[in-house]
Amino acid sequence: MFVRKLKDCKEIVAGDNCILRELLGKKDNIVNYSLAKAIVKPGDITYKHKLKESSEVYYILEGDGLMYIDNETKEVGSGDTIYIPHNSVQRIKNTGDKNLVFLCIVEPAWCPEDEKILE
């Protein structure tokens, strides 16, 4: 049985400038996807970026924001699921007054070589 506690995952500032804790990833060698918890602080927006080979799903746990994928923009909030196709330019903005908190699932598992920051 594999169990990992969120508090045991190192908090980092990701390449797109969100606060991230990776729960599962390539290094674990048990799944083909990665799972992370992300936070975007009030008023912040992530850098434009894309994953060249991987698709991504965001599941919003808390907060409100604007999701930008290529030329589309949608309001998102708690309980929303967002699919981001591979090679799509993406970013998310926190439009609320509390942290925007979401889970990120990347398939195949995220790796630094796959991500391209555009700003």
Image (cartoon, rainbow, N blue to C red):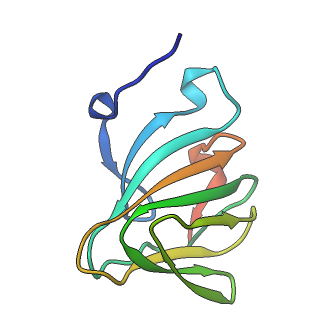
Q: In which quarter of the image is residue 39?
A: bottom left
Q: Position of residue 71 (x, y in %)?
A: 69, 89
Q: In this view, does 4 lie to the left or right of 91?
A: left
Count of numbered tags: 0
Q: Where is residue 55 in the image (x, y as percent from the top left)?
A: 72, 56
Q: In this view, does 97 lie above or below 29?
A: below
Q: In this view, does 9 lie above or below 36?
A: above
Name the residue located 29 percent from the left edge and 28 percent from the top edge. Answer: 8
Q: Position of residue 29 (x, y in %)?
A: 63, 20
Name the residue located 60 percent from the left edge and 48 percent from the top edge. Answer: 105
Q: In this view, does 21 lie to the left or right of 112?
A: left
Question: Nearest the camera: 73 or 13?
Answer: 73
Q: Which residue lies furthest to the top in this view?
A: 1
Q: Where is residue 96 in the image (x, y as percent from the top left)?
A: 30, 81
Question: Nearest the camera: 106 or 65?
Answer: 65
Q: In this view, does 55 lie to the left or right of 68?
A: right
Question: Nearest the camera: 50 or 24?
Answer: 24
Q: Quadrant of residue 30?
A: top right
Q: Which residue lies furthest to the front in this view?
A: 79
Q: In this view, does 107 lie to the left or right of 45?
A: right
Q: Quadrant of residue 5?
A: top left
Q: In this view, does 25 lie above or below 42?
A: above
